[in-house]
Image (tube, rainbow, N blue to C red):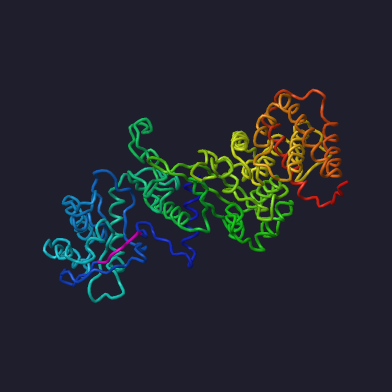
């Protein structure tokens, strides 16, 4: 399914004249230097094509498949110095790699001989790479140290605006060579097309990299237990060379295009629309909003509409939308999520997600529509992205897209972090909104956006009571506290209320007495609120409360705290 949809995506991209995507058998690779030679294969000069020390993308001939281990697999008319010059930089030392150099020469000769290519530029390249004396002149060039381990290709003097790999004769010869290789390759039924096609042992790689890794495949086999019926490597999952090349080009396009991917923790999430590019634009921006991003009017209008359940006209679309989450792994890409549904269904589920997150803000700097990254960061120690627990992003993304239950382990992690973290991060706006969404979706709590004085469930009332007792303590001290009851008692109060609240109420009487001596009117107001809350509580508080009720305690606390700050009523001291 994934490979089929990526193949279909490639076909659509190839038909778009505004998108320059490579044909099968060709690839845009990182080239840093150009070796310029004359028509007799004599060395002329080196051109540095890097931009700010970074290579440029140049389309070159490439037979798909990873180059790994001791297998010598040179490229046609381009490669790194290990193959072209038989030298590489390893552990700070320049070493000889003669076997690689020899294989590069032989492979280029083989392609030209098999295809009957008669080109002055390729003849010049063959002369140069076979002439040790001419190549030795390159070692003396000022760029040589920078060139080591870099990819290079060639230009023949006179072809000012054309590289050898851009020659139409060269491209035609390379296609002919691939056709010859296809005839000699093993023929099997392609899993994508269903046709008998040439299948190569190794699938192509995603060269842009997922996470810190580069050149890793989406499909591969490297252990004996996965090699069914003695079928080695990718003969377990036969896909024709043409289609394998196409779906890899589509993957590379998505990974390389910021309009079609977002990075959350270690997961690169790729997304694309069957036809509705408008929704594709909304999707990426809605889930990847950062704290300092400016939200456009169009995006704000879209989010407001879907959150309220009103579907914009351009999103009422039954065409499909695809989301593919990839993460790095030891030998291949790990698929964290694959989800496909109609544009309208996914938009509705995103709207439901934001509706369930909706909660009163702590301050004006809080995002009304928290991004996926912002929510997941609430599960991390010290709010550092690298500390985000594994296997969080994929399940959460699936829950959002499908409208299914959030993972229960997220609630446990959030509550644990809330008990450990101090001050602002203990129960901030994003953490509270995340907890509220989980409680409403998974436990049907039906918690409101702001304080609900009509809600008389015990956990919610206890959270409100704790917030009120803390507020009285703060007001009695005149704001000169280094720590409040929250810092010492929040965790135990939310898990074992019977053991903690009698002690808190005793402390409250002392705080209230002091507040009455300074601000009698305020003290009476607070005392009345405490009485109202306690009046709805049972005489015997629970000894312990369940995980979901601990979450409701946190929301009751958060709602009551924000309500204190929202009210601007003046209380006259007596």
Locate residue 165: give its quadrant.
bottom left
Residue at x 46% of width, y 54% of height: 255
Query: Is residue 204 visible from the viewing direction of this image?
Result: no
Of residues 104 and 24, the one nearer the viewer is 104
Residue 160: where, in percent of width, then height? 28, 76
x, y (%) of residue 408? 62, 34
Membership of 209 in magenta stretch: no
| Residue positioned 56% across, 45% down in the render | 377
Please report the residue visible at 86 percent of the width from the left and 47 percent of the height from the top.
Answer: 573
Give the vertical position of 41 relative to 262 (above or below).
below
- Seen in the image, is 255 located left or right of residue 302? left
User: Does 522 sit left or right of 497 as displayed?
Assistant: right
Q: Is residue 33 magenta?
A: yes
* Magenta region: 29-34
The single residue placed furthest to the front in the displayed view is 517
In the image, is 166 to the left or to the right of 311?
A: left
Q: Is residue 367 visible?
A: yes
Q: Position of residue 82 (x, y in %)?
A: 22, 54
Quadrant hosting residue 62: bottom left
């Amino acid at each position: 399914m994934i490979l089929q949809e990526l193949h279909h995506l490639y076909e659509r991209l190839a038909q778009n004249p505004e998108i320059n995507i490579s044909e099968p058998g060709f690839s845009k690779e990182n080239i840093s230097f150009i070796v310029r030679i004359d028509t007799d294969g004599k060395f002329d000069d080196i051109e540095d094509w890097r931009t700010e020390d970074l290579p440029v993308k140049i389309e070159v001939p490439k037979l798909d498949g990873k180059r790994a281990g001791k297998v010598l697999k040179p490229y046609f008319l381009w490669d790194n110095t290990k193959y072209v010059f038989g030298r590489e930089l390893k552990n700070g030392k320049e070493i000889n790699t003669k076997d690689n150099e020899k294989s590069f020469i032989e492979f280029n000769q083989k392609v030209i001989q098999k295809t009957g290519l008669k080109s002055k530029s390729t003849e010049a390249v063959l002369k140069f790479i076979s002439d040790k004396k001419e190549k030795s002149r390159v070692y003396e060039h000022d760029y040589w140290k920078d060139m080591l381990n870099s990819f290079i290709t060639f230009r023949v003097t006179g072809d000012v605006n054309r590289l050898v790999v851009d020659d139409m004769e060269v491209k035609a010869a390379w296609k002919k060579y691939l056709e010859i290789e296809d005839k000699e390759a093993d023929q099997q039924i392609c899993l994508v097309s269903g046709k008998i096609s040439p299948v190569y042992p190794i699938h192509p790689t995603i060269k842009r990299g997922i996470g810190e890794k580069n050149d890793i495949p989406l499909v591969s086999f490297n252990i004996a237990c996965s090699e069914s019926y003695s079928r080695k490597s990718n003969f377990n999952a036969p896909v024709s060379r043409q289609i394998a090349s196409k779906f890899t080009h589509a993957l590379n396009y998505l990974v390389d295009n910021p309009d079609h991917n977002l990075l959350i923790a270690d997961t690169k999430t790729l997304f694309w629309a069957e036809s509705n590019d408008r929704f594709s634009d909304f999707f990426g921006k809605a889930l990847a909003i950062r704290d300092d991003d400016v939200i456009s009017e169009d995006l704000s209008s879209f989010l407001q509409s879907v959150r309220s359940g009103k579907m914009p006209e351009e999103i009422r679309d039954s065409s499909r939308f695809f989301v593919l989450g990839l993460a790095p792994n030891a030998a291949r890409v790990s698929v964290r999520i694959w989800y496909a549904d109609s544009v309208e269904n996914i938009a509705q589920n995103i709207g439901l997600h934001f509706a369930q997150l909706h909660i009163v803000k702590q301050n004006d700097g809080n995002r009304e529509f928290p991004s996926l990254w912002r929510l997941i960061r609430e599960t991390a120690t010290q709010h550092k992205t690298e500390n985000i627990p594994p296997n969080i992003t994929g399940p959460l993304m699936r829950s959002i897209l499908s409208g299914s239950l959030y993972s229960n382990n997220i609630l446990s992690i959030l509550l644990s972090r809330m008990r450990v973290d101090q001050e602002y991060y203990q129960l901030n706006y994003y953490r509270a909104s995340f907890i509220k969404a989980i409680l409403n979706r998974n436990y049907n709590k039906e918690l409101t956006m702001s304080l609900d004085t009509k809600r008389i469930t015990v956990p919610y009332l206890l959270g409100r009571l704790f917030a009120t007792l803390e507020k009285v303590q703060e007001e009695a001290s005149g704001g000169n506290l280094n720590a409040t009851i929250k810092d010492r008692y929040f965790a135990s109060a939310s898990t074992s209320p019977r053991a903690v609240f009698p002690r808190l109420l005793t402390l409250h009487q002392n705080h209230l007495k002091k507040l009455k001596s300074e601000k009698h009117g305020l003290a009476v107001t607070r005392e009345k609120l405490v009485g109202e809350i306690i009046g709805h509580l049972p005489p015997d508080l629970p000894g312990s409360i369940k995980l979901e009720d601990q979450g409701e305690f946190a929301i009751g606390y958060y709602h009551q705290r924000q309500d204190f700050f929202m009210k601007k009523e003046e209380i006259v001291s007596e």
